[in-house]
Amino acid sequence: KNLDESISEIQLEDTLNNMNNLSSKISQDATGASLGYGYVQFETKEQAEKCIEETKGLKIKDKEI
């Protein structure tokens, strides 16, 4: 959550590239504008938990995710 509205799904994927994520999606409204949050899918619960720990305090475009 707390994603800058200008962040694309590709930018989010690139940021999390080393986290072994399978896919990511940014939620959008009916006009296609970002809602400021998204979802990231992992193969295992352990991979997801590792990503959460490693991204604590991570900033993308001056916003902490």
Image: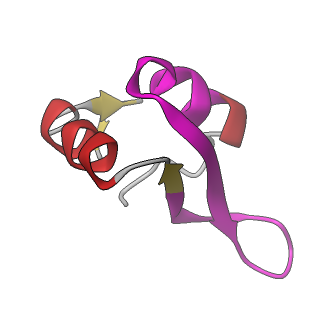
Q: Is residue 65 positioned above or below 16 on the image?
A: below
Is 1 on the left-hand or right-hand side of 49? Answer: right
Is 28 on the left-hand or right-hand side of 45? Answer: right
Quadrant in the rendering for residue 12: top right
The residue lying toward the viewer, choosing from 49 and 56, is: 49
Picture coordinates of residue 31, whole percent (x, y): 86, 74
Residue at image point 32% right, 40% down: 47
Single out the residue that lies furthest toward the right.
Answer: 31
29 inside magenta stretch: yes
Is 65 on the left-hand or right-hand side of 31? Answer: left
Quadrant in the rendering for residue 19: top left
Which residues, given as a range, are shown in magenta?
A: 11-39
Residue at image point 27% right, 38% down: 51
The residue lying toward the viewer, choosing from 18 and 44, is: 44
Residue at image point 21% right, 48% down: 49
Quadrant in the rendering for residue 54: top left
Picture coordinates of residue 29, whole percent (x, y): 73, 78
Picture coordinates of residue 34, whole percent (x, y): 65, 62
Residue at image point 41% right, 30% down: 61
- Quarter of the image for the N terminus: give it: bottom left
